[in-house]
Image (cartoon, grey):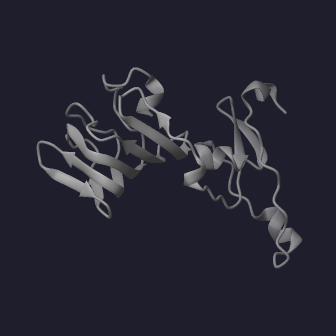
Amino acid sequence: MTEQQDVALPLAPRPPRPAAVAEEEWAENLSEPARYGGIAADGAREQEGPVVGGELTHRFREILVQTADLEWVDKTLAGLSQKALWRDEDTGASITLVRFLKGSGIPSRHSHASNQFMFCLSGRYTYVPTNVTLTAGSFYWNPKGSLHGPTLAEEETVLLEFYDGPHYPTQPDWYTDPNDAR
């Protein structure tokens, strides 16, 4: 291991080779090294990759996450919690389950540094000024730089949220922890 031993993440045990897959194919069936974060990547690091920018990179095979087995992690905005599934540490792109408790929401108008995509799994989540309401099955795209909000969860709401790059141009004032704005 390199000097970065103190920041190395645990590696998942190598899964058994399926009988239908040749040994050579199984040995080569890995992603390119990448710096990914989130529960999916954290639980599936199979090999150490090279050190890039002072951080270890890793390789992965297929990854399955049972989101029902994950705990919700509170953010510093009251009523908001998340299950971080995947994050590209180099670009800021991410996939996260977010939950807003009834009566909570984003308190002010804001924009994002990348495209924001949300798929509503359950609940009612309203963009107050425009009265756009997400309900189960709704897909919402908020283009990069577009001003929107504030929002209100009319009932407990769970959204699958995707960003294709960093979330915010600067840390919003409703978060006191910089990690919440990632």
Is residue 142 among what the camera can see? Answer: no
Q: Which residue lies at the image location 63% right of the left edge and 42% below the top edge?
A: 35
Q: Which residue occupies the foreground of this view, 50 or 81? A: 81
Residue 3 located left or right of residue 173:
right
Residue at 51 percent of width and 44 percent of height: 83
Left or right: where does residue 175 sit relative to residue 95? left
Q: In which quadrant is the N terminus drawn?
A: top right
Given the current orientation, which residue lies at the most extreme bottom position?
20
Residue 90 seen from this side = yes
Q: Residue at x 21, y 47 (%)?
A: 126
| 158 vs 41, nearest the viewer | 158
Residue with the most extreme right position: 23
Tell me: residue 19, above or below residue 112.
below
What is the total number of numbered labels drawn onto the structure image? 0
Q: Which quadrant would the C terminus be assigned to in this image?
A: top left
Q: Is residue 27 above or below residue 54?
A: below
Where does the image place residue 128, in percent across and percent down from the top left?
Answer: 15, 42
Can you give x and y, in whole percent of width and height, for residue 12 in the image? Answer: 77, 48
* Of 167 and 139, the residue lying toward us: 139
Q: Position of residue 143 (x, y in %)?
A: 27, 50
Residue 36 image position (x, y, % from top left): 60, 44
Q: Name which residue lies at 71% across and 59% down.
A: 61
Tell me if residue 6 comes above or below residue 52 in the rendering.
Answer: above
